[in-house]
Image (tube, rainbow, N blue to C red):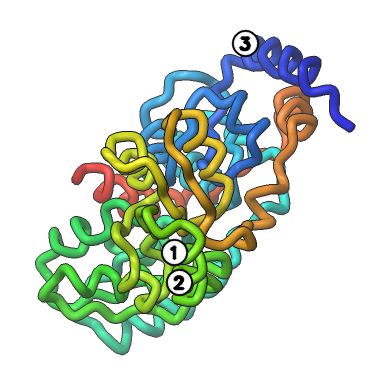
C-alpha cells in the first residue's frame, strides 16, 4: 500500500530540484491526475511539450506520447515512469507497411494519428489528434488521404470531408469494444442522459451518440452544457476529471469495462523514482526525430 501523502510531498520536492513538469493524460489513475501540472488530451499535452521551459518532462501516459514530447523538445530529458506502457493501436502499423501503402497510392497524402510510433510519423505528411483530425484532412491539397492507423477515426473523418479517406485497419482495443448494445443499456438506466462518445468508437456507436468529441471536447461539453446527466463513451479514467472539473453533473460510464490497462500502469512510486533517477528516459534517433517533427509541427501550426 502506497503512502500517498508522503509520495506526493517527495514528488513536489523532486520536481522543484529537477525543474520538471508533469504532463498527465486524461486516462491516467486519479492519484496521478491529482499531481499533474497539466492534465489533457494528446493535442493539449503535445502543445505543452513544445512550449515548456523546464529541464525535465515527466510524461504520465503511454510510449508514443513520451516519444512525441522527446521529438518536440530534443534538448529536454523526457521520462516515461511506466516504461512498458504502450499503445497497442500504435503497434498496428509499421514504417515499412506505411511505405508500401505510399507506393500503392503515390498521389495520396499521409495523415497519421498521433497514436503512432516516431518511425511512422517520420513517414507521414502531417499528424492529427482526435480533436483536429477533420481540420487536418481538410487542410490538405491532395484529394486522397491515407489515414493511419485508426480505421474508426478515419471513417469518422470521412463524414466531414469530400476527400477520399483510405483508413488503415488499426483500432483502439478499448473504444472498439464499445457496442450499440452498451448505448441501449445505458439509455435504459439513464433515459435523460446525453450520450457523448469518442471518435475512436465504431461508426454504429457514433450513429447513436448525441455528441462525438475528443476527451477534452467531452469535458468541455459536460462542463458547459445545460444538461445534468451524461453517459461517457470513452476510457473510464476521464470520469475522475469530470467529477473534479464539472461539479453538479452526473456522469456514467457507457461501458465500465472501457479500461486501458496500459494507461493504468503508472503509480506514484514510479513517478517519484523516475524523478530520482531520471529513468526511464525516452529518446528518438535524430534522423527519425527530425522527419517526425515536421509532421507534428505542421499539425500544431494549424
Nearer-N-terminus badge (3/2): 3
Label 1: how many Cα within 10 Å (few below 14, some 14–19, many 20+): some
| Residue 241: percent from left, percent from top | 51, 35
Q: CA distance from mark 1 to mark 3?
A: 47 Å
Q: Regarding mark 2 in the picture, which secondary structure is present there?
A: helix
Position above or below: 289 against 224: below
The structure residue drawn at horizontal position 26% and vertical position 85%, both measured from the top left corner, is: 105
Nearer-N-terminus badge (1/3): 3
Q: Regarding mark 1 in the picture, which secondary structure is present there?
A: helix
Position above or below: 89 against 5: below
Evaluate whether residue 129 shows in this view. Answer: no
Q: Which mark is residue 187?
A: 1
| Residue 54: percent from left, percent from top | 50, 19
Foreground of the two, 30 or 124: 30
Front tag of 1 and 3: 1
In this view, the residue farthest toward the bottom is: 104
Q: CA distance from mark 1 to mark 2?
A: 5 Å
The structure residue drawn at horizontal position 74% and vertical position 37%, both measured from the top left corner, is: 267
Position above or below: 206 against 132: below
| Residue 209: percent from left, percent from top | 33, 65
Cβ atoms under marks 1 and 2 closer than 8 Å: yes
| Residue 117: percent from left, percent from top | 51, 60
The structure residue drawn at horizontal position 64% and vertical position 35%, both measured from the top left corner, is: 30
Is 63 displayed left or right of 74 in the figure?
A: right
Q: CA distance from mark 3 to mark 2?
A: 49 Å
Foreground of the two, 110 or 289: 110
- Mark 3, residue position: 16
Q: Regarding mark 3 in the picture, which secondary structure is present there?
A: helix
- Mark 2, residue position: 184
Amino acid at each position: 500500500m502506497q503512502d500517498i501523502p508522503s509520495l506526493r510531498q517527495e514528488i513536489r520536492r523532486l520536481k522543484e530540484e529537477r525543474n520538471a513538469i508533469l504532463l498527465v493524460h486524461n486516462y491516467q489513475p486519479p492519484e496521478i491526475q491529482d499531481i499533474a501540472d497539466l492534465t489533457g488530451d494528446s493535442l493539449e499535452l503535445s502543445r505543452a511539450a513544445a512550449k515548456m521551459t523546464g529541464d525535465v518532462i515527466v510524461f504520465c501516459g503511454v510510449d508514443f506520447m513520451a516519444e512525441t514530447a522527446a521529438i518536440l523538445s530534443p534538448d529536454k530529458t523526457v521520462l516515461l515512469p511506466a516504461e512498458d506502457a504502450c499503445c497497442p493501436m500504435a503497434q498496428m502499423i509499421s514504417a515499412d507497411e506505411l511505405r508500401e501503402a505510399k507506393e500503392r497510392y503515390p498521389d495520396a497524402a499521409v495523415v497519421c494519428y498521433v497514436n503512432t510510433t516516431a518511425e511512422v510519423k517520420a513517414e507521414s505528411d502531417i499528424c492529427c489528434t482526435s480533436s483536429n483530425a477533420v481540420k487536418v484532412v481538410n487542410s490538405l491539397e491532395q484529394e486522397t488521404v491515407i489515414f493511419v492507423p485508426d480505421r474508426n477515426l478515419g471513417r469518422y473523418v470521412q463524414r466531414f470531408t469530400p476527400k477520399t479517406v483510405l483508413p488503415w485497419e488499426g483500432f483502439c482495443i478499448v473504444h472498439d469494444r464499445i457496442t450499440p448494445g452498451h448505448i441501449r443499456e445505458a439509455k435504459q438506466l439513464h433515459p435523460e442522459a446525453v450520450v457523448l462518445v469518442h471518435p475512436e468508437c465504431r461508426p454504429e456507436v457514433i450513429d447513436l451518440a448525441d455528441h462525438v468529441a475528443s476527451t477534452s471536447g467531452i469535458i468541455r461539453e459536460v462542463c458547459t452544457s445545460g444538461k445534468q446527466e451524461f453517459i461517457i463513451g470513452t476510457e473510464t479514467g476521464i470520469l475522475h476529471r469530470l467529477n473534479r472539473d464539472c461539479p453538479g453533473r452526473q456522469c456514467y460510464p457507457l461501458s465500465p469495462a472501457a479500461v486501458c490497462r496500459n494507461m493504468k500502469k503508472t503509480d506514484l512510486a514510479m513517478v517519484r523514482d523516475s524523478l530520482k533517477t531520471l529513468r526511464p528516459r525516452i529518446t528518438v534517433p535524430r534522423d527519425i526525430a527530425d522527419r517526425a517533427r515536421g509532421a507534428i509541427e505542421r499539425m500544431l501550426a494549424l
